[in-house]
Image: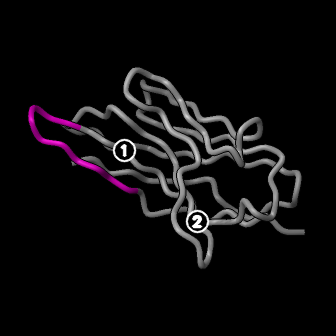
Amino acid sequence: QVQLVESGGGLVQPGGSLRLSCAASESTFSIYAMGWYRQAPGKQRELVAGFISGGSTNYADSVKGRFTISRDNAKNTLYLQMNSLKPEDTAVYYCYADAYSGSSYRHAWGQGTQVTVSS
């Protein structure tokens, strides 16, 4: 199994920055895709940014140019650098990972971290 632990959320003023981290546990499963979703109150969970198989990245249109996803494979850690934050970025941010071991596949979620953008 893969376990994910997020950190780095908090309260920030509009225009500010935050960096989220997602640490993946050691596992016999190999992660082939990893990224971030978010869910604002009363809204559906939406993809923010992610790495897909082959190392390509994709971003939601609403965060392009402001958010950057990166990873440190040596530390099994995923990051989301969020700049120029807006009140509409307020949400619970969830890390996810897709992993496989042989013919078994797993999809894992972190517990979520709250990001609040407000003056």
Q: Amino acid at mark 2?
A: Val
Given the current orientation, which residue lies at the most extreme top position? 54
Q: Which mark is residue 97?
A: 1
Q: CA distance from mark 2 to mark 1?
A: 17 Å
What residue occupies the far front of the structure in this picture? 61
How does the figure colour the protein chain or chains? Answer: one colour
* Residue at figure coordinates x 49%, y 24% from the top left: 56
Identified by mark 1, the residue type is: Ala
Question: Could you tell me which secondary element the residue under label 1 belongs to?
Answer: strand
Instruction: Give the quarter of the figure containing the C terminus.
Output: bottom right
Return the residue at label 2. Answer: 92
Give how far across and how far down residue 101 sits, in percent: 14, 35
- Magenta-highlighted stretch: main secondary structure? strand
Does 99 sit left or right of 5 as displayed?
Answer: left
- Left or right of residue 115, residue 43 in this image: left
Residue at 50% over, 57% down: 94
Q: Nearer the viewer, residue 11 or 14?
A: 14
In the rendered image, residue 55, in percent from the top left (x then y), is placed at: 45, 22
Front residue of this view, candidates 98 and 62: 62
Q: Is residue 14 left or right of residue 43?
A: right
With respect to residue 115, does 69 lie above or below? above
Q: Could you tell me which residue is drawn at 58 percent across and 48 percent down? A: 48
* In front of the other: 55 or 31: 55
Q: Which residues are magenta?
A: 100-109
